[in-house]
Amino acid sequence: MDTLTKMIPAEIRDTYVANTKARERDLAAKIGISEAELIAAHCGVELSRFSSRIF
């Protein structure tokens, strides 16, 4: 991956899904990003609402 071209989070997630057998560290190195960027690409994707009511 060219260092001048940044991948958007959706591209990172797609690459992750396409390479499920690869370790996160190896995949991040392969596509030229840090492990933190790989994790950050998944932040906020799946949201769930918390209720303040006590059952």
Image (cartoon, rainbow, N blue to C red):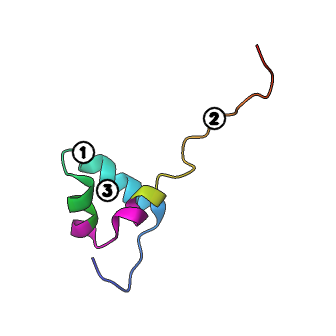
Return the residue at label 2: 48
Q: Nearer the viewer, mark 1 or mark 3?
A: 1
Left or right of 20 on screen, residue 38: right
Alpha carbons under labels 1 and 3: distance apart: 9 Å
Q: Amino acid at mark 1?
A: Thr
Where does the N terminus fall, quadrant-wise? bottom left
Q: Residue at position x 47%, y 61% from top? A: 9
Near mark 1 (Cα within 10 A), the count class, few <14, some 14-19 or many ≥20, is few
Q: Amino acid at mark 3?
A: Thr
Alpha carbons under labels 2 and 1: distance apart: 24 Å
Query: Which image quadrant is residue 46 in?
Result: top right
Q: Which region shows up in magenta?
A: 29-38
Alpha carbons under labels 3 and 2: distance apart: 24 Å
Return the residue at label 1: 20
Q: Which mark is residue 15?
A: 3
Secondary structure type for disc 1: loop
**Which of the two labelled residues, at mark 1 and mark 3, occupies the earlier sequence position?**
3
Q: Residue at position x 41%, y 70% from top? A: 7
* Image spot of residue 52 (x, y percent): 79, 28
**Which of the two labelled residues, at mark 2 and mark 1, occupies the earlier sequence position?**
1
Principal secondary structure, stretch drawn in magenta: helix
Where does the C terminus fall, quadrant-wise? top right
Q: Amino acid at mark 2?
A: Ser
Relative to 28, say whether 23 is above or below: above
Q: Residue at position x 39%, y 81% from top? A: 5
